[in-house]
Amino acid sequence: MAGRVTAARRSLPTYLVLGPFAILLAFPFYWMLVTMFKEDLDLYNAENVPYVYNPIQWKFWESATTKHVEFLFTDTHYPDWLVNTAIVGIAVVVITLIVALPAGYALARLSGSWGQTAGIGIFLVYLIPPTLLFLPLSPLVARLGLQNSLLSLILVYPSFTIPFSTWLLMGFFKTIPQELEDAALVDGCSRLKALTRIVFPISLPGILTVVIFAFSLCVNEFIYAFTFISSTENRTISSGVPNELIRGDVFFWQSLMAATLIPSIVLALLYNTFLDRFIKGFTGGAFR
Amino acid sequence: MEAHAASRRKPGTRRWRRALEDRRVLAPLLIAPAVIFILLVVGVPFGWAIYLSLTDSIGGSLKGNWVGFDNFTNAWADDNFRKAFRNTLIFTLASQAIVLVGAAVLSHYLMSDFRGKWFIRLLIIMPWAAPVALGTLGWLWIFDSLFSVINWTLGHGLGVVDSSDPPQWLGRPNLALLSVIVVHAWRILPFAVIIFLAGLASIPSEVDDAAKIDGATGIKKLLYVTLPLQLPIALVALLFGIVFTAADFTVVYVLTQGGPFNSTQMLTTWSFQIGINSGSLGEGAAISLYLFPLLAAVTVAMLFFAKRAQVS
């Protein structure tokens, strides 16, 4: 008992610092949550306390509603956007793994001193922002007949997922003991076989981390999705929600907030689960 | 058995197999797809952007007449461009200042173990995990001109602002610039925390023990032990932050579209305005390339610090 009390007292400053920050940082998401179930009469009454649900005409059982969330899923293209986002994300992750797995391994193990430099070089490509590339890419995409097609995004997104993933995978592969591979090589395995039979299976947690983060980069991307795709039903969530759910001056705030909160929570849970591994891979790359 | 089977294969295959065992052959072979892909989808468009910026190309076309540096000088002569240039600098520096201080404090406390850490960390990383366009929409609603929760709290709640004439967060030039800075800092802060945590995780535990023996705790330890050791990775976080902020398009576009009166126009939104909306592809490309010197400087600095972090 006593030990527990002192432990709690020792972490008191931690709570006092982190608590307010956490509340501040997460507030917009709380705000989305409160908004998405509100009745119009409650939401658009400036006298009401906005943080809670206010009963309308004292009928407290009618103070919250799911109808705006239902509207989002039945009367808008939101479900299509979710599907499109998933298609793009999965396709990009597959392409990324095919290209980045061998590259990350080679940079970690086979390439000696120039490997480190090459690794950093590939990673720096991640820093060339889409805002510098979208202007030439958008007529290029049109010329290839890919405008308004998800294929354009599938083709362009690996431009940032590959550098990012190669870097992380390089970090993960470096943490695998060399002896395991050497043993396999001595046993007559070829290098490629050692790679697919030994290295990749051991690295599965790291590879999964890369999958999560590469997928989330695709969900996040805005400017390509916004400029390449123009028809409502072909959009992804990141360009569909801000551009298609707002009609002129009419904002369907409850539906909008539901549309923003759902993917945010899913991604945040995934991030938090894989964060420790992400940190390991990131530092394993170079900043040791 | 295996060797026997191999010897019966064509000699060409065997030579090829032996070559695959040689790291001087295998390594470039495994890296090549990544390099080729990157050259195609990053190198080519980047070169094209430079080419376009030197032509009078207009919307939809990939060619134009050579005009030299006219696009760059014309862009610079425009007041809106210079405003965008200045805004980009303010936006980047101000939001990164907030981010660095916040990340140093948060990561320090997140290193310790405490009950409920998983949940608190979840709340802290949410702004970075959420898709940027969607998180920013949440802020659009928070800054709403009629039903802003900030204004309700300040007006009805605390009574410090006049509820009949509340601040228009996105409707007044200075407030709008402040708003986009705060929202971007909100978004980048968790990322900087993650990078800081990565840096702290790499500090050996012996240093911690030594600090404890010498009686360094709390703020003192943060100032004299942790921060100096963290400097290289803090710089890496800063450099990332600078690139992400200077090159950001989404936050500004969703919140203000560069308004009111171009007061939150950035190089990115202005190049979109000129290159896509007005269709002057060449000049749009020139405007976005004004970002390049900044990005190049950051890249060089990054290489330098990455090397140093590695050595130490």
Image (tube, rainbow, N blue to C red):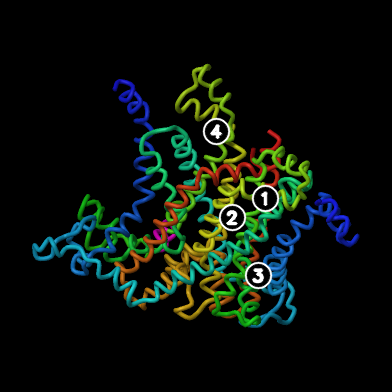
Q: Crowding at label 1, few (<14), some or many (≥20) Cα neighbours within 10 Å? A: some
Find the magenta span and give its range: B173-179
Residue carrying label 3: B286
Residue type, mark 3 in image: Ala
The residue located at (78%, 52%) in the rendering is B27
Q: Identify the chain of the residue marked 1, using the numbered disc in the image.
A: A
Is there any visible trace of residue A236 in the rendered image? Answer: yes
Spatial separation of the CA atoms under disc 4 and disc 3: 40 Å
Q: Are marks 2 and 3 on the same chain?
A: yes
Residue carrying label 1: A197
- Seen from the viewer's position, the closer of residues A63 and A171 is A171
Spatial separation of the CA atoms under disc 2 and disc 4: 23 Å
Residue type, mark 4 in image: Leu
Q: Where is residue A32 in the image (x, y as percent from the top left)?
A: 32, 60
Most frequent secondary structure within the magenta stretch: helix
Q: Are marks 1 and 2 on the same chain?
A: no
Q: Which disc is residue B227 wearing?
A: 4
Residue type, mark 2 in image: Val
Q: Crowding at label 4, few (<14), some or many (≥20) Cα neighbours within 10 Å? A: some
Spatial separation of the CA atoms under disc 2 and disc 3: 18 Å
Q: Quadrant of residue A147?
A: bottom right
Left/right of residue A16 with respect to residue A238 in the rendered view: left
Which badge, 2 or 3, is on the more N-terminal residue? 2
Left/right of residue A28 with respect to residue A145 in the rendered view: left
The residue located at (59%, 29%) in the rendering is B204
Left/right of residue B62 with respect to residue B189 in the rendered view: right
Residue carrying label 2: B243
Say if mark 1 contacts mark 4, CB within 8 Å.
Answer: no
